[in-house]
Image (cartoon, helix red, strand yellow):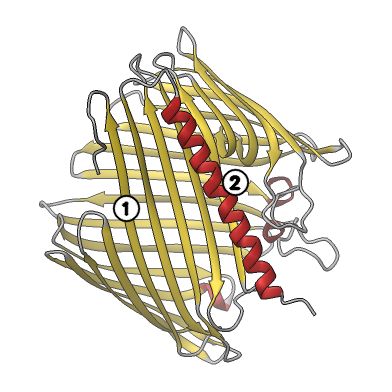
Amino acid sequence: MRDHQKENSGRIRRNFLKVTGGVLAVSSLMLASPLMAADYSFSGESNTIFRMRTTIDKKDIYPVYEYLRLNMTDNRGDGSAVSFYLGAWGRADLADKSTDKDSYADLQYAYLSYRAARNNTVVNLGRQFVSEGVATEKMDGLYLRNDFGAGIGAAAFAGKSVITEPSYKGGNFVYGARLSQGMPKYYNIGLSALKSEGDDKSRYREEEGVDIWVHPLKQVDLTGRTSYNSITGGWMEHAYALSITPLESLRISADISNINYRDYFFNVTTAALKLISGNLGIIDPNEKLLAAGAAVSYAPINNLAISADYRNYDYEVAGSADYFGGKLSYSLPDSFAAGFGAHRMEGDSDRLRYSEYRLYISKKLGPANLSVDAINVNYDKKINGVRNSYAITGSAGYEFGPKLKVGADVEYSKSPDFDNEVRGLVKVTYLFDTKRSEGRGKSEK
């Protein structure tokens, strides 16, 4: 029989070697470029995270994660720059399996980028995340952006969608564009579209949208977006937010959003957001959500803030709920922070009728920092025999220098779904960078 753990480990090592080889190859090309002039920099961040918890069926889940980010940039003498960005992560289980695999690794992004000295020109090639109006897509492909005269800008992209689950069939070829016009200090309006084809060249996704940003006065800020699904013939989303700051110490905000699930979650690229069809999927396609809310924040004196907020959730299938309350917080920059909040949820179901309280305190002692965060949810009626749900988290961190940080936290919780659960986490963050400037014989580290 095959040793699947060794097989998975071997595949991860091969993928890691491929990624490392690619990084070294790109770095060598950038270093050898005859156009290199101003400076060359290499930086990165490593986050190693060890989690600990015991499941309801008494399994010990101790996975270790590694998140790696690398950036290489060649700033040219004419003001342009060529960069390479890479992000990858891996997971290995040290005890019982957290998923159906003992280990797993994935490439989050890896692309070569050129930024021109003028016109905000950008060219990206590789695996990247595109966010242009209605389009928010992870793809392997090409992205272009440029600003023209009269405040007009344009962006376009094309490539292959990145599917999160290997066995999940999503769109194949995806492409789209955004055209915008505006004045940097006052407003920007964009029109965007996205189209994705299936493996058989069929219509998989077709979405169009408009997005706005209006800033007529220093104290007023309005943002919003509307998107439409051409295949289903319905509006996917309307979402708008307004912020007003009449005084430096006073801020008022309001927002409203409307989502039609059947149109919004149509042909997604992850099975976790798949609409219910037969016995598959978890999202009800008949659901619609209208959410609206407002908040006020006031700082009567330095370092002290008082806020109040209200939000209404109106679900067509699940019912409606009102969430409202306030918060009091006090903070001294880079030294101390504390806060207390109380909210009430009034909904149609027992799970949505409760009072919520939160208290947190954090203190920085030189290179060390300590914090405690406690949240309590008191249900009007018992849920699975539990009326009082709570979670208490204690955290500690220490900076050994500007490049090395170590932190840990322990959480103890009780809820209607988990009884007396304990979770732990240890995180090690390491930053590294190298910079070589023209006219210097050695690198700076």
Res 194 visible: no
Residue 162 percent location from the top left of the image:
67, 46
Q: Earlier in the sequence, mark 1 or mark 2?
A: 2
| Residue nearest the observer in this picture, 414 or 110 | 110
Q: Which residue is mark 1?
A: 431
Residue at image x 46%, y 80%? Answer: 52
Residue type, mark 2 in image = Asn
Residue type, mark 1 in image = Leu
Residue 386 percent location from the top left of the image:
50, 89
Res 307 visible: yes
Residue at image x 74%, y 50%? Answer: 262
Left or right position of 405 against 166: left
Density class for disc 2 (Cα within 10 Å; few <14, some 14-19, many ≥20) is some
Residue 246 percent location from the top left of the image:
24, 36
Residue 408 in the image: above or below residue 238: below
| Residue nearest the observer in this picture, 333 or 237 | 333
Return the mark for residue 258.
2
Quadrant (top left/top right/bottom left/bottom right) for the C terminus: top left
Residue at image x 33%, y 16%? Answer: 77
